[in-house]
Amino acid sequence: MYNFEYSRAKSVADAAKAASGDAEAKLLAGGMTLIPTLKQRLAKPTALIDLNGIADLAGIKRDGNNLVIGAMTRHAEVARSKDVKAVIPALAHLAEMIGDPAVRNRGTIGGSIANHDPAADYPAGVLGLNATVITNKRQIKADDFFTGMFATALQDGEIITAVSFPKPDKAGYMKFKNPASRYAIVGVFVAKTGNDVRVAVTGAGAGVFRAKDLESALTKSFLPTAVEGIKIAADGLNSDIHASAEYRAHLITVMAKRAVVACG
Amino acid sequence: MATMIGTSVKRREDAKFLTGRGNYTDDINRPGQVHAYIIRSPHAHATLASVKTDKAAKRPGVVAVLTGADTAADGIGGLPCGWLIHNKDGSPMVEPPHPPLAQGKVRHVGDPVAVVIAETYAQARDAAEHVEIDYKALPAVSDASKAIERGAPQLHDEAKGNLCYDWHLGDKAAVDAAFAKAAKVAKIDLINNRLIPNAMEPRAALGEFNRATGEYTLYTTSQNPHVIRLLMGAHVLHVAESKLRVIAPDVGGGFGSKIYHYAEEAIVTWAAAKVNRPVKWTAERSESFMSDAQGRDHATHGELALDKDGKFLALRVSTVANLGGYLSTFSTTIPTWLYATLLAGVYTTPVIYCEVKAVFTNTVPVDAYRGAGRPEASYLLERLVDIAANVCGLDRAEIRKRNFIPKTAFPYQTPVALQYDSGDYPGCLETAVKASDYAGYDKRRAASEKAGKLRGIGISTYIEACGIAPSAVVGSLGARAGLYEVGTVRVHPTGTISVLTGTHSHGQGHETTFAQVVADALGVPMESIEVVHGDTAMIPFGMGTYGSRSLAVGGSAILKAVDKIVAKSKKIAAHLLEAAEADIEFKDGVFSVAGTDRSKTLGEIALAAYVPHNYPIETVEPGLDETAFYDPKNFTFPAGTHICEVEVDPQTGVVTVEKFTAVDDVGRVINPMIVEGQVHGGVVQGIGQALYEGCVYDPKTGQLLTGSMMDYCMPRADNLPAFSVGHHTTLCTHNQLGVKGCGEVGAIGSPPAVMNAVVDALKPYGITHLDMPATPERVWRAIHSARQPRAAE
């Protein structure tokens, strides 16, 4: 990796101040993407501002009907949290499916969604559950947060502090893993809250997106058979050595159906 | 007291490996050491218009920046090829130069172009960005079948049409005649997918030069340090053996990829003298992907002629083998003498003809990888036998039984050069059928179907050839090396023993197994024996470890040395016990006068040998230290039956291995636990080849698309079921231990078992073949296109 300045922030304000003064600085959360990128010399930040010393960024709280997960909460903690399992078991399941044990013990929810890797799992959970991303400046609805491949609505100096998930009636996440990287080739998060059904798809496109055809079918009838016949268009989907766009399109339907089954 | 052989003694080497106290090449640091970063070609094919180093040389910490111009100026030679193959017309193969640093042209992504040496690795890598290299990109070709087409990009001026050789084996006329009379013919076209070895420890090399003595030392991640000393000393650096010491300390896995003499070894050794400081290089994982020799990569057409009863009449095979951009050390023998000679398999096929075109492409060189040629042969044959069963309407076990070489037929001469010494193929099949609960398969299939899954079962009845030998025979086939082994048994004055072996352990557990063998042979406790390997300054010239040879060849050499120790000890005992030598008996570590209670232990004899006060000094030399070289009479022939059951999810195409049974005949088993571990590892790599692993180059640019663990899928624990491993043993007839070798059986027997199971599962869709790896999309597409016939396109 190239040389950079390293600082360990003591508070969010501290980190925001450091980040806003330097456009080439990077925030370091779990580092599960950033550190390998640095090691490969694919990024050359001037500074790394380490968020790992800010104690109040981590932790899981219940807030009325909502589950509020601190930005620096590790995937492993979400996966084994009694609160998460009680309120949104599908989210605990999603966290359990991320990477491998080393990744789950380092990686954070804030880091994952701020990075918005098009094959990451958390974006599907955040979008599918209609969560709210809380930053040091404002609250951002999930529908407004993910703006494109590795792109989000976050501004310079803006730091995610937590994500607030409303409790759904039912939710399920089904992931078709890339056998090598264990990222999602296709991951589908289905959530039903009252009459509102949301279907968020990760891995298949340039970023996480909602599958409207599946949503409207499931709104009419929340049954696995409701999505069975729906053909997703392959246009615009990712195509690589692991899966063609056509195969990914097919998998979206299969995973959606299985996610509905997982909703119970 | 022969109690150690056959016992699952815990691996004595594991204490250091499991507690992080191993001593690997990268753990070694020498005073004044500097670090090398190798600049590698980002292009698959390009001419080097210029390489400018002056800016980089001025960067902080830089000691030297060396290029191909420097190696040329110093008269550094090319990396040699160890096996000469002849064309069909008798002419020799093409051997283009293989410079350690590129000379005017690069031929694959990862081809070394320059080396930056600096005080720290980070400084070397930083400075490397200031080496200005002007590449003129050329069209590239990565597919061997395309590389021999007219108009393909040409890699080497010497190799017209990119052809290294066009070789054949067998009686073509007899085969053609048999096909003309055949009742039925089974045919297949298949790809044996290219694999990336991925040993856990990346390659590393540390070169050192002593200006006072003129001695070079190379620490390297090698399976055969003597071979490296010979090849590098004689061919590349022109340094006498007496001035070159090669040490292969603890090595973390090889699987073949650490047999070869690599450019980096020569570069650091040469550079150490140039900068007069020790130079270390350790590969990053991404370098391993683009510089460790890769495996397999065949495109093959095979045809099996059958009579009306399903008896094999003849086999005809045509293979295009990809060698990569240059000839790696033993690359040329893999698709020839280690492949075509195995095409008889365990069957009585009377005539066989195989032709092989070996081709240069803009890819990383290909060489032996666990099994090396034999997995390619067994995969082809065992897939073809399944297709033949289909063509003849026979059960897949039944057609095998009809064609097995009977137990009574040994020694058995195949039509493709080998003579098998022992085996019991029907017995292996029968044992495996029982162990796998073959009879209960229908129930398991019904249960899978109830759960919406397809289930398939696959059998492979494979054979391989290990302990490649004798030297004179392999020499006549083009080997430029001997294939004997050496062992020294050094009994120290107090009776403790050092066993020096020319083989090398890099995960196989030799330190345990060899000690077990010597403990039994000399009747001494294992604790008094240490096994030493991996240092050319300590050990006589040995050939190293590959091809499952270590116990069969190296173990036999050690036992020969033990025999010499016993013979000499008898003479000493006779003197000490005042008896005739003929009356001395040796048993359980004690030399005694027959019929008396007078005896001497090995320790007492050793002490007398080193303190020869009362000693037959006129007729016996002092000391108790014997070396033996052993050149085998033949290959050994492990064989076995692997049975695999898979489930296929028809909606996603995901294949899961549900059950795997391996019954192998590896000859006498010295340490059952170690053998089981070897079989497990081999089977996992075989399952990896069948379902997960596939090296992919961009067909247009030759870029390596599977250049990291993110894209190259190694099998993991959660991909695998518990294995059932068993044995059905016949002894090797021509070595003292009766051993055959176990390192490669798993990787040879398992891929066809898995793929036969996958194809069986897909049988309802009319699918008769699928290439490896059977990735989810490949399986889904096969199902999908079968469901929607071509007319729908």
Image (tube, coloured by chain):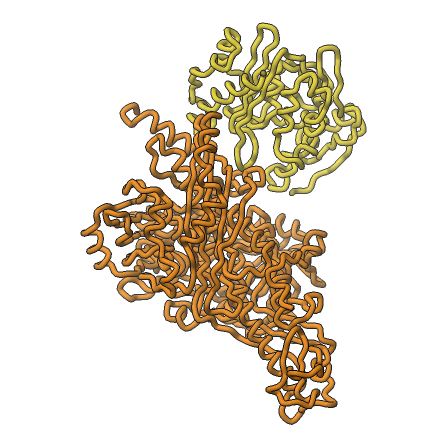
On the image, the x and y values in percent for residue B375 come to: 43, 52
Q: Going 35% across and 46% down the picture, which residue do you hit?
A: B398
Q: Nearer the viewer, residue B51 or B580?
A: B580
On the image, the x and y values in percent for residue B142 come to: 39, 46
B390 horizontally vs B682: left or right: left
B362 horizontally vs B493: left or right: left
Give the chain letter for orange. Answer: B
On the image, the x and y values in percent for residue B674 come to: 59, 55
Q: Is residue A115 above or below residue A39?
A: above
Q: Is residue B199 above or below residue A130?
A: below
B332 horizontally vs B394: left or right: right
Q: Nearer the viewer, residue B241 or B464?
A: B464
Which quarter of the figure is the C terminus of chain B placed in?
A: top left
Q: Is residue B599 above or below residue B30?
A: below
Q: Nearer the viewer, residue B327 or B54?
A: B327
The answer to whether residue B272 of the structure is visible from this angle is no
Q: Image quadrant of residue A5? A: top right
On the image, the x and y values in percent for residue A215 come to: 52, 12
Which quarter of the figure is the N terminus of chain B placed in?
A: bottom right
Q: Image quadrant of residue B13? A: bottom right
Give the chain letter for yellow. Answer: A
Q: Going 76% across and 27% down the picture, which residue do you hit?
A: A15
The answer to whether residue A94 of the structure is visible from this angle is yes
Q: Image quadrant of residue A184? A: top right
Q: Is residue B549 above or below residue A250?
A: below
Q: Going 58% across and 61% down the picture, which residue do you hit?
A: B670
